[in-house]
Image (tube, grey):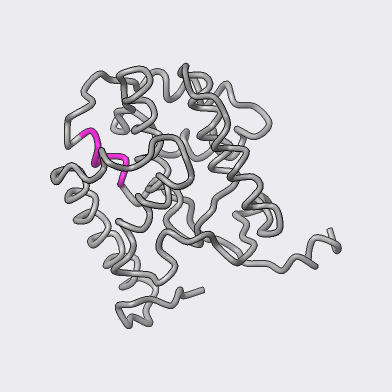
């Protein structure tokens, strides 16, 4: 389903290319002008600030909580009905150790608060927490994309896979732009969201 966009594009492939080009430029700006350092760390407010900065030239919903129920394959992300409460609970989750930070990251992925652009925004959010709390970030070039997506899909039930995968990719290059930008790679993002209505839940 083609998302309504500010670019006036009506072709899904063209939109995806422009979205990636624009958001990468925005991500570089965030890194180089120091604006990223002014965002809240480990809260939905901070994540919303990241998302808005990346996507405000593409979508009206940039930085705003989604109004649709969405799923990927057989996995349904948090229902709109409970989304705000879920985000408040995530805000309160501890983040003083690597394990706690990844558990918080997993919960934010389950929440999936935005209509599009969750993966890229949340990976920046994750690295901000890691940088502040343990002086490390993820070197995403060391994370196999397929392994990452499969581990994230399984993480609500079994989180040891994603913890090991990301722990093995930790680096102290916290101010390296190339390391930072690898997390913006759109090919890591979940593709093929399905939008469904709340009443669909009753039929399953």
Q: Which residues are magenta?
A: 179-184
In the image, taking residue 85 as reference, residue 118 lies left or right, namely left
Please state which of residues 148 and 80 is positioned toward the viewer in this rendering.
Answer: 80
186 drawn magenta: no
Please state which of residues 9 and 133 is positioned toward the viewer in this rendering.
Answer: 133
Please state which of residues 198 and 10 is positioned toward the viewer in this rendering.
Answer: 198
Provide residue 201's location: percent of width, then percent of height: 80, 60
In the image, taking residue 28 as reference, residue 163 lies left or right, namely right
Residue found at x 14% / y 44%: 32
Residue found at x 23% / y 33%: 179
Looking at this rendering, what residue extends furthest in the left direction?
Answer: 32
| SS majority, magenta | helix
Q: Quadrant of residue 81?
A: bottom right
- Vertical arrangement, residue 173 with respect to residue 62, above or below: above
Provide residue 117's location: percent of width, then percent of height: 42, 56
Residue found at x 40% / y 63%: 62
User: Which quadrant is the C terminus positioned in?
Assistant: bottom right
Provide residue 65's location: percent of width, then percent of height: 53, 59
In the image, taking residue 23 as reference, residue 163 lies left or right, namely right
In the image, taking residue 46 as reference, residue 32 lies left or right, namely left
Q: Quadrant of residue 139?
A: top left
Provide residue 123's location: percent of width, then percent of height: 39, 40
């Amino acid at each position: 389903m083609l998302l309504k966009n500010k670019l006036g594009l009506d072709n899904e492939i063209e939109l995806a290319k422009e979205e990636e080009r624009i958001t990468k430029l925005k991500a570089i700006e965030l890194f180089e002008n120091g604006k990223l350092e002014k965002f809240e760390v480990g809260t939905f407010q901070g994540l919303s600030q990241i998302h808005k900065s990346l996507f405000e030239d593409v979508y009206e919903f940039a930085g705003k909580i989604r109004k649709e129920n969405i799923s990927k394959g057989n996995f349904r992300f948090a229902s709109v009905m409970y989304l705000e409460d879920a985000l408040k609970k995530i805000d309160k989750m501890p983040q003083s150790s690597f394990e706690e930070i990844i558990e918080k990251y997993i919960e934010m992925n389950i929440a999936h608060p935005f209509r599009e652009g969750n993966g890229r925004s949340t990976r920046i959010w994750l690295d901000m927490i890691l940088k502040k709390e343990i002086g490390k970030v993820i070197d995403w070039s060391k994370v196999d994309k397929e392994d990452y997506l499969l581990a994230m899909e399984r993480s609500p039930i079994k989180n040891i896979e994603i913890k090991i995968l990301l722990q093995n990719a930790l680096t102290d290059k916290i101010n390296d732009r190339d390391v930072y930008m690898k997390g913006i790679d759109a090919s890591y993002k979940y593709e093929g969201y399905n939008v469904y209505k709340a009443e669909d839940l009753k039929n399953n």
